[in-house]
Image (cartoon, rainbow, N blue to C red):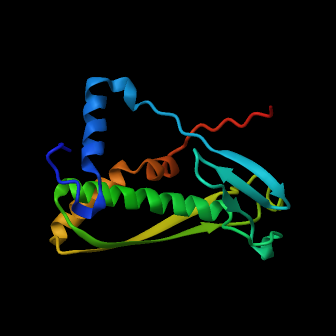
Amino acid sequence: MSASVTTSLNDVNMDAVAGLAGKIQQEPEVADTRWSAKVNWKGGFRSEATIRDFDPMASDEPGALGGTDTGPNPVEQVLAALGNCLAVGYAANATAMGIELRDVNIDLEGDLDLHTFLGLAPQGNAGYNSISVKVNIDSDACAEDIRTLHEKVVGTSPVGHTLSRAVPVRIDLA
């Protein structure tokens, strides 16, 4: 990406992105970042996640899972995180490629077996068995450019990469 790319295409500030990329090329250690969230239990299956200075995001389970359905549940939030990450990727990469986007819609579904979550199969998988994503891009760009854009986004999505490979997770009791 270069700083000469317009910042008005797709409402993306490419000067900021290009500036960060340039800084990382000069100082590679700048690329090593740490992100965080804090979650507070609110009773029952309700909790709130606080990230940076944003308002807390509610989480709850649907009534069928014993919750009060006051917010999306954590596995729905995982799908949303993937979709949001892909949307960022399409916007940034389309802008870098000079592709104007009129609309991007991303539909995500995940298959999850509740046996392990409910303690009925303790050795099973409590997480998603599969996730499918359908992306619809409305643009005047040719099909080849859209395919190139799609491959670039899928190949560089931080959340996509996180979900598609084993990531060490350590959960300590304080």
Image coords of residue 49 (percent x, y): 67, 52
Relative vertical location of residue 120 with respect to residue 31 in this rendering, above or below: below
Q: Nearer the viewer, residue 140 or 56?
A: 56
Residue 128: name its quadrant. Answer: bottom right
Tell me the residue at 75%/72% (across/down). Answer: 69
Q: Nearer the viewer, residue 95 or 75?
A: 95
Is 67 situated left or right of 100 in this image? right
Instruction: Decide if residue 150 is in sight here.
Output: no
- Quadrant containing the N terminus is top left
- Quadrant containing the C terminus is top right
Residue 86: name its quadrant. Answer: bottom left
Tell me the residue at 49%/58% (across/down). Answer: 82
Tell me the residue at 28%/57% (across/down). Answer: 151
Image coords of residue 154 (percent x, y): 35, 56
Tell me the residue at 44%/56% (across/down). Answer: 85
Q: How many numbered circles are shown? A: 0
Relative vertical location of residue 108 with respect to residue 17 in this rendering, above or below: below
Relative vertical location of residue 154 with respect to residue 37 in this rendering, above or below: below
Is 160 situated left or right of 92 in this image? right
Q: Nearer the viewer, residue 116 or 68?
A: 68
Image coords of residue 36 (percent x, y): 59, 40
Image coords of residue 21 (percent x, y): 28, 37
Instruction: Decide if residue 61 is in sight here.
Output: yes
